[in-house]
Amino acid sequence: MRKNETTAEGAGQLHSTILVIGGGAAGMVAAIAARRSAKGPSQPCSITLLERNARPGAKIRISGGGKCNVTHRGTPAELLEEGFLRRNEARFLRHALYSFSNSDLLELLRLRGVEIEERADGKVFPVSGDAATVVRAFEELLRESRVEAHYSCRVRSVERKGELFVVTTAEDVFTADHLILATGGVSYSKTGTTGDGLAIARSFGHTITKPSAALAPLFTIKPPPASLSGLALRGVSLVATAGGKSAERRGDLLFTHRGFSGPAALSLSRDVAELMGVARNCALFADLFAQHSSAELEAELLKQARKSGTQMVRKFLQSCPITPPNGSFGAAPHGTIPTALVTFIMRHAGLENDLTWSGLAREKRQSLLLALKRFPLGSVRDVPLDQGEISAGGVSLSEVNPKTLCSRVVPNLFFCGEILDYAGEIGGFNLQAAFSTGWVAGVNAAKSG
Ligand SMILES: Cc1cc2nc3c(=O)[nH]c(=O)nc-3n(C[C@H](O)[C@H](O)[C@H](O)COP(=O)(O)OP(=O)(O)OC[C@H]3O[C@@H](n4cnc5c(N)ncnc54)[C@H](O)[C@@H]3O)c2cc1C
């Protein structure tokens, strides 16, 4: 970095070829990639990173419950398919995920001594079980890459003066030829993500898709009964309906004291937040037998009634696996319907607690079927934006070139990570997207001369 004391601003002005704002997953990788792509000594490239926190990687540190689900198993095509359900977002990320894949990321970490393990569900974690090992690896890479990192340094504003970006913090004025905005989304604002980068992008004329909740818990108007709090349903289908529209997600569902969490609720939360924007009343239902149509489930119930007419329906439900794969009803390695919930199912279906199969006449059977296929979970009160693992919305993808991550509005301005208008599923997809887009932004900022 050159220090030029004689600037019009009066304060010391620090100039770099590339300046990165934000020291999260995307910003750190962008700075490292920029160094690796910079031309030789004939064209010196100075790289500066400004991070408002005292240390980088605040979200990496808390990711995966502090264990850091750093990426997901699979080819880039598989990651795009499984991790990014909206086709336009997957299309946008395609080039980045192929340019810097999960294998590239893991190789980078392994070379810094971070051993990695893959879990049966495809999630990838450091063997240490400690997210700090991942952050330390990136801190070392930043040092090795001669990146001038300034911590506890919050950017207040950015202006364009001629060909230069002029970046103002509380204490300094920085200038740069190329600017990479990597300030993240807006959830978990206590980690530093308060949307500063979005305001900067907007001031440059970029369209910002309004941030909304994603991978967030669902709070209901009437919280679930206290006796159900903490209870988990395995592999159910969670359905949200509002204003004649609906959305659905299959997965595990957790009852909480304020509503619902767990993979199915988190994954559905972005759709729920959108549905609530259309119609305030968004109702939630659980389909406990998502792999069976109502007719198939009814056939199973009739079979059970013929087999053991004296058995109490309640007893059967207590031992009945949730969502058994078709054809293996009663013998799947899934969780059962928790006893506490069975009482609510029976009550909701209007059935007596001691009802036996022989007493389950057609009308009662229909009520039970409905309760099992469409068990009401209440109406959503809120999908708290700040409590989401990520936020949806951000810099409009149509204004950013996916091959370079350079702005189509302002030359030499680049974006990477969660500031962009995409949102991935849980499973390591969001960190991978941040690393991959960071890489592409860094490489192209360095290449663009
Ligand atoms: C609780 C939690 C758990 C998660 N778990 C996982 C997981 O296991 N796997 C996974 O893939 N994803 C997970 N995520 C999501 C993942 O952490 C993020 O998607 C990812 O970190 C985004 O990276 P980023 O670099 O774009 O943004 P961030 O990591 O948010 O980094 C942005 C940085 O910019 C800085 N900044 C902002 N404004 C300024 C400014 N004005 N000046 C200077 N610096 C600024 C911020 O301080 C921040 O450090 C989790 C998120 C949370 C909140």
Image (cartoon, rainbow, N blue to C red):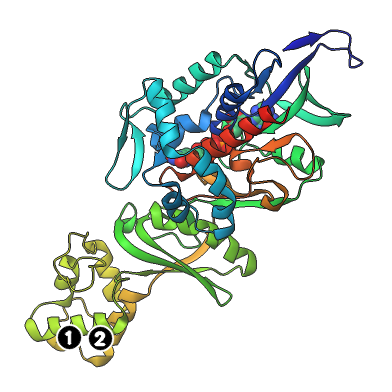
Q: State the SS at label 2.
A: helix
Residue 129 location (% of width, % of height): 33, 29
Left or right, residue 187 beside residue 364: right
Q: Is residue 100 above or below residue 395?
A: above
Indicate which disc residue 302 carries: 1
Kindly identify the residue that appears in the image at 43 percent across and 54 percent down.
82
Indicate which disc residue 365 carries: 2
Asked if the residues shown at circle 2 and circle 1 are in contact, with their CB atoms under 8 angstroms apart, the answer is yes
Residue 42 location (% of width, % of height): 70, 14
Kindly identify the residue that appears in the image at 53 percent across and 39 percent down.
99
Q: CA distance from mark 2 to mark 1?
A: 9 Å
The quarter of the rendering in which ligand 1 is drawn is: top right
Q: Nearer the viewer, residue 219 or 72?
A: 72
Left or right, residue 185 beside residue 118: right
Instruction: Nearest to the eye among marks 2 and 1: give it.
Output: 1
Q: Residues within 10 Å of mark 1 (few under 14, many from 20)?
A: some
Q: State the SS at label 1.
A: helix
Q: Amino acid at mark 2?
A: Arg
* Quarter of the picture holding the N terminus: top right
Kindly identify the residue that appears in the image at 40 percent across and 58 percent down.
264
Q: Residue 239 sits in which quadrant?
A: bottom left
Residue farthest toward the right in the current orientation of the protein: 8
Left or right, residue 163 beside residue 250: right
Pointer 2 or 1: first along the chain:
1
Q: Residue 375 sits in which quadrant?
A: bottom left
Kindly identify the residue that appears in the image at 50 percent across and 19 percent down.
141
Residue 304 location (% of width, % of height): 13, 81
Residue 232 location (% of width, % of height): 30, 55
